[in-house]
Amino acid sequence: MWNNVRSRTLLSALVALTAVCLGSLLAPAQNQSNSAVEAASQACPNDESGLKLPAGFCATVFADGIGHARHMVVASNSVLYVNTWSGRYYGNDTPHAGGFLVALQDKSGAGKADVIERFGETVQTGGAGGTGISLYKGWVYAEINDRIVRYSLPEDSIVPSGPADIIVSGLPLGGDHPMHPFIINGDGTMYVDLGTATNSCQLKNRTLKSPGVQPCTELETRGGIWRYNANKTNQMFSTADRFATGIRNAEGFAIDSSGRMFVTQHGRDQLHANWPDLYKPDQEATQPAEELLLLKAKGDYGWPECYYDAFVHKLVLAPEYGGDGGKTIGECANKIAPIAAFPAHWAPNAMALYDKKQFPAHYRGGVFIAFHGSWDRAPYAQSGYNVVFQALNGDRASGQCEIFADGFAGAVKSPARAEHRPSGLAVGPDGALYVSDDIRGRIYRIAYQGGSEGGVANVTPCPSLTAPAGNPVEVAAQPPEGTHPDAGAAANNLPVPHGATREMVLLGGRIYRGQVGGAACTGCHGDSGQGTPLGPDLTGKKWLWSDGSYAGIKKTITEGVSQPKQYRSPMPPMGGAQLTPDQVSALAAYVWAASHRAPPN
């Protein structure tokens, strides 16, 4: 801000004088701060988790590297059972050796698993793993591929030795949400989430201005909760077993002491990307809200005709079904609204009711929710990647939610660069809370060390649903050779394809990051084109579509990819944006340049 030497000299003198005058005043506060850090370290001597927790709580890394860990359940003997997954969500990487189900036990009481055993189907037997897992009457129930099976647990081992019984098979696979989370209540009724195959039941999924299917026939087999008998084997999936409908993707389940059932719902994506005439760019990041639902028999929760508007706090008509950007309610007045809402695109992947006494009374009877983290907030900052607490009062939410645990992602919250992403939750018989990570297979164990009747301090409220998206971020602009005085030269050093110019490559980089054109590519392809579970790597020489030429890339961007070969979500034409022909050419030039960039020295 200062533009002459005299001003800078004066400023330096003032800073020095201030430091001298205030040094003695700051010293006691600094010493107190250091003492607080030392006290926290002493209170949690084995906490190497990197998590930010309320005062009095400590975390340990219970286990690491066990595979893409999804949902969990804890037995009465404190053995933790985890289901792990594989496939398109994880870039089709090589699954962990052994069975997809994992049993973990802490025999020493140090807060870390010293016994880890795997069981169940393997890649060699045709398994791909799954998400859902539960315990009921001495059996481990688990999702594997298109079915839910159970294994009998012997008294002398933490893993089963016999074959699995099939409880239900033929569950729908494929599409955007192929997982089958479930919960079993006290009488053996099993409730299974069958997430939708599409984002919003469009004629062409995730495609610019494609209308909704009338009626949405997908709801016959997807987009709801199905009910089965956990005591009965060899049941087959049937449309007649649907319990509730209009739920896009309910991965988190919880049942309270009165038998009330709660489920989470992932809100839809791409309001601005697919309907730019109705929604502003920042509304891609701020709409719609994520939801907590009270599950009712034959309930209709609105998908795909409706979504929950975070600003007006109502279900409103979706653009695919005649909506006008959030003004019209229409048939949504007859749908069941959520009992609580959370910031857009945080992705609630799991939920656990806290019914133990180890945590302070503040948490009893409420739910913890694991938010996997957003991808559809680009080009604005991604968010979520945390565990939230929501208090309940009977059949409704009580007060604003709180950020209970954060820091899983590390330095950057994004699908491509997050170190860990919360994916599962479970409460142990001793009251500890377990959190799973499906990126590097880490399991965290969180316990309260402040005394059974302690209070709750340093609680962080969730952001307001109406908080602005903020300014577009440019994490993708970080140069590959690192941060140094010449790092900014990276953009100018990108190669230029024949038929394009350097100015086109630079413009294409801005389009890629969402600064021009209204829709970012970073959400699916990563901050620097390195790929994510949603979209392929653009920086290498392997091309799933076209021959990788400048013309071929331009054709793929223009036409989109309606049937992906290896990834779960299609790419709409022009990425769902309304790009001009010149912008398409510029974006293609940037993608070509990214794939032909010389390796750093």
Image: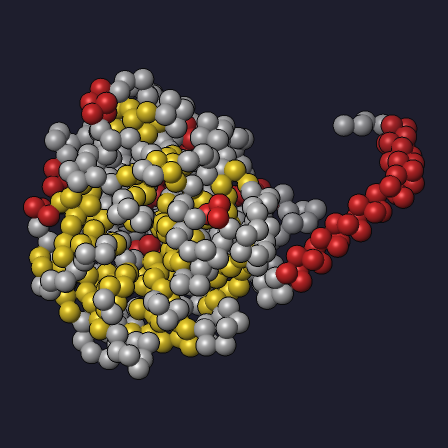
The answer to whether residue 159 is left or right of residue 163 is right
473 and 183: which one is in front? 183
195 and 9: which one is in front? 195
The answer to whether residue 291 is left or right of residue 595 is left
- On the image, the x and y values in percent for residue 548 come to 35, 49
Can residue 234 be seen here?
yes
Residue 560 to residue 100: above or below: above
Structure colour scheme: secondary structure
Looking at the image, the residue that sits furthest to the front is: 453
Q: Residue at x 71, y 53 (%)?
A: 36
Q: Residue at x 51, y 65 (%)?
A: 61
The answer to whether residue 346 is left or right of residue 140 is right
- On the image, the x and y values in percent for residue 159 come to 30, 76
- On the image, the x and y values in percent for residue 65 come to 44, 68
Q: Residue at x 36, y 31 (%)?
A: 288
Q: Residue at x 19, y 56 (%)?
A: 187
535 and 19: which one is in front? 19
Q: Quadrant of the C terminus?
A: bottom right
- On the image, the x and y values in percent for residue 133 come to 28, 61
Can residue 68 be seen here?
no
Looking at the image, the residue that sits furthest to the bottom is: 156
Question: For residue 218, which quarter of the picture?
Answer: top left
